[in-house]
Image (cartoon, coloured by chain):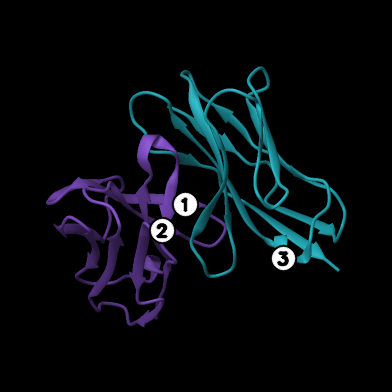
Amino acid sequence: SQTIHQWPATLVQPVGSPLSLECTVEGTSNPNLYWYRQAAGRGLQLLFYSVGIGQISSEVPQNLSASRPQDRQFILSSKKLLLSDSGFYLCARRRGGNYGYTFGSGTRLTVV
Amino acid sequence: AQSVTQLDSQVPVFEEAPVELRCNYSSSVSVYLFWYVQYPNQGLQLLLKYLSGSTLVESINGFEAEFNKSQTSFHLRKPSVHISDTAEYFCAVSRVRGSYIPTFGRGTSLIVHP
């Protein structure tokens, strides 16, 4: 089966600290991968997407960056977290034939 | 460009009552339509999708949605809800051709009371 792993599930970080969230995919090769942020009451915001190793497209200029070091690995990073970076971060994979997305279980980040 | 409007941010309902979650979209091109469900502290799960063919699509847990092209709507319905249906529901659209990145609505919180 095609599975998306995200970790950690929850994270509490102080303002100004670095961030690294990891997403790995099983059961498929060359997936299109996405990072979304979900803030309370604000729906889903697309942050980055990647169609292959080393290929990153940024949708929203901000304090975050993404990298795709391996085919099935997608990393979301920040050098210095802001309070506004708090939220629920979701990694997703595009299903074949444009038949929707498969999402990971998410990471809840609280910046204090 | 396309957009999705979920008119209700929250829908409270009693158990075993019927429910309708509304979704309207705007697009200048043909689109695919999706409903996702998100249980607390979990990722989104694809609930059902409309790609082509019959305008009424069903999920395995009793939800159904009807694509209405003239009204540009894709409302989600269930004739009798259960406590376990309490969740956030997201409507999404993506272009049939061109950029496949979906546009999501802001979500509707379905709250089922006993």
Work out whether disc 3 and disc 1 sit on a shared chain.
Answer: no
Q: Find residue B67 and report its horizontal and vertical position in percent.
A: 65, 28
Badge 3: residue crowd in 10 Å (few <14, some 14–19, many ≥20): few
Distance (Cα) linking label 2 and label 1: 6 Å
User: What amino acid is at disc 1?
Assistant: Leu
Q: Secondary structure at mark 2?
A: strand
Disc 2/disc 3 C-alpha distance (Å): 25 Å
- Which residue is disc 1 drawn over? A44
Q: Which residue lies under the disc numbered 3?
A: B84
Chain B display color: cyan
SS type, badge 1? strand
Q: Chain of mark 3?
A: B
| Disc marking residue A37 | 2
Q: Amino acid at mark 2?
A: Arg
Q: Residue at x 29, y 60 (%)?
A: A25
Residue contact at pointers 3 and 1, CB within 8 angstroms: no
| Circle nearer the N terminus (2, 1) | 2
